Amino acid sequence: MVLDLMLPELGGFEVLELWRGRLSTPVIVLSARTELDARLQAFAGGAVDYLPKPFWIEELLARVRARLRLPDAAAPTRTFGWDGALLDLDARTVTLAGEPLGLTAHEFNVLLYLVERPARAITRRQLAEAALPAGGDRSERTVDSHVARIRRKLGPAGARIATVWGIGYRFDAPEPA
């Protein structure tokens, strides 16, 4: 994906934040911003390359071709594990003790959003806007229902999803070994 940072309504950094963790597609950022802070922010947001403007189209095409030549095996698998549960971002699966859990796409998105932001209180509104489709039901009750089903399916591993009363939820990640 080629992303220009200067977009009319939503900025490129915001787009990177929304897509990070949802897509495994590599992102090449184009920008008239040449300062180091902008480049570092793009890489921190998940970009794999940064091409300042003005640029030659031949260079952009060469960078895209080079990125496409990289084998998929070179990309690290993105997984999160805790208490016998394993969330595989690339395969979009969750297993518990090696057995697949039947999470819906929305449940997976809610769980992923929480797991990627450990120890942070996430509001129900944030969860709804980030993990549920724009045209669907994004009410607080819908978020609560998804979280309840995720906890039930995860069993004891679901206890890591803590309720933050009056706010929403928090994922309490285990301490690193």
Image (tube, grey):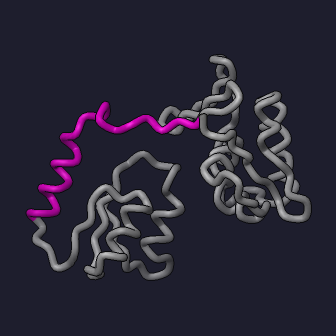
Indicate yes or no whether the magenta region holds residue 71.
yes
Q: Quadrant of the C terminus?
A: top right
Please say if 162 is above or below 101: below
Based on the displayed image, in which of its 4 quarters is residue 136 positioned? bottom right
User: How far across and down, in percent of the image, does residue 19 sit?
Assistant: 49, 57
Q: How many marks?
A: 0
Decide if residue 58 is on the left or right side of residue 107.
Answer: left
Residue at point 43%, 35% (across, down): 77
Let me know if residue 54 appears in the view.
Answer: yes
Q: Is residue 101 visible?
A: no
What residue sits 48% from the left and 67% below the top? 15
Image quarter of the N terminus: bottom left
Quadrant of the rendered image containing residue 30: bottom left
* Depth order, front residue of 129/80: 80
Q: Residue furthest front?
A: 177
Residue 96 included in the magenta stretch of the image: no
Residue 9, placed above or below residue 171: below
Identity of the residue drawn at 37% across and 79% down = 6
Q: State which region is magenta.
A: 58-80
